């Protein structure tokens, strides 16, 4: 339904032709490689390969193709990854048809566009301090189920230092338990399930 709605929105735009529709990330990579479209509109969550993986592969096979991502996953961490990987447009599925059409038009013409909903999420998340490299490593170890002494051994630091990083993570992510910490980290795209 989402693919058909997006296709109809793009087809209704003057000067735009839909050259292909795919149902998964692997097909998307193949289509970008074969068709070399001016602009590809991707979902972030696709079977086979994620929108981020397709974006990275598209850069390799068709560097001139501009990429717009439409997602229902409102995660500041994922949005930052998409920007870092070179996405020219990021929109929420809840965006209006007009915002999506105008955004795709702008992306196709060479501009970078971040939808209003995405901007709000990024602004909200910027209130949280960024995690340090070591905090990210500790968070990944927590996600693997390691205890403080286990994390200390894995990272070559003292258990007291691990505890300091864990406390900082809890503060930065507004969590009061390990379970909440992990849920928020997954939601913000800081760790992958």
Image (cartoon, rainbow, N blue to C red):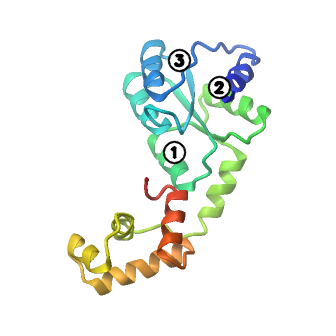
Q: Is residue 5 above or below residue 129?
A: above
Label count reads: 3
First in sequence: mark 3 or mark 1?
A: 3
Q: Position of residue 15 (x, y in %)?
A: 70, 13
Question: Label 2: how many residues lie within 10 Å, few (<14), some (14-19) or many (20+)?
Answer: some
- In front: label 3 or label 2: 2
Depth check: give the residue in front, 179 or 139: 179
Distance between the alpha carbons at the discs numbered 1 and 2: 22 Å
User: Element under label 1?
Assistant: helix
User: Element under label 3?
Assistant: loop
- Residue sticking out furthest to the bottom: 160
Distance between the alpha carbons at the discs numbered 3 and 1: 20 Å
Distance between the alpha carbons at the discs numbered 3 and 2: 17 Å
Q: Residue at x 43, y 53 (%)?
A: 192
Residue 68 falls in image quadrant: top right
Question: Label 3: how many residues lie within 10 Å, few (<14), some (14-19) or many (20+)?
Answer: some
Q: Is residue 115 above or below residue 124?
A: above
Residue 100 falls in image quadrant: top right
Check contact, mark 3 vs mark 2: CB within 8 A. Answer: no
Tell whether 95 sits left or right of 48.
right
Question: Label 1: how many residues lie within 10 Å, few (<14), some (14-19) or many (20+)?
Answer: some
Q: Residue at x 62, y 51 (%)?
A: 74
First in sequence: mark 1 or mark 2?
A: 2
- In front: label 1 or label 2: 2
Q: Position of residue 6 (x, y in %)?
A: 69, 26
Residue matched to label 3: 37
């Amino acid at each position: 339904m989402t693919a058909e709605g997006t296709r109809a929105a793009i087809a209704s735009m003057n000067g735009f032709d839909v050259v292909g529709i795919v149902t998964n990330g692997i097909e998307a990579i193949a289509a970008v490689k074969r068709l070399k479209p001016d602009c590809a509109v991707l979902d972030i969550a696709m079977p086979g390969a994620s929108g981020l993986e397709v974006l990275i592969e598209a850069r390799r096979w068709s560097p001139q193709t501009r990429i717009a991502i439409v997602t229902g996953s409102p995660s500041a961490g994922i949005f930052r990854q998409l920007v870092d990987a070179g996405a020219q447009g990021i929109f929420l599925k809840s965006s209006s048809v007009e915002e999506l059409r105008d955004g795709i038009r702008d992306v196709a013409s060479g501009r970078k566009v971040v939808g209003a909903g995405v901007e709000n999420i990024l602004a909200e998340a910027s209130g949280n301090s960024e995690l340090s490299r070591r905090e990210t490593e500790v968070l990944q170890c927590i996600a693997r189920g390691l205890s403080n002494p286990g994390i200390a051994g894995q990272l070559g630091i003292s258990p007291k230092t691990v505890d300091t990083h864990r406390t900082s993570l809890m503060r930065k992510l507004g969590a009061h338990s390990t379970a909440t910490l992990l849920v928020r980290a997954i939601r913000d795209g800081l760790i992958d399930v």
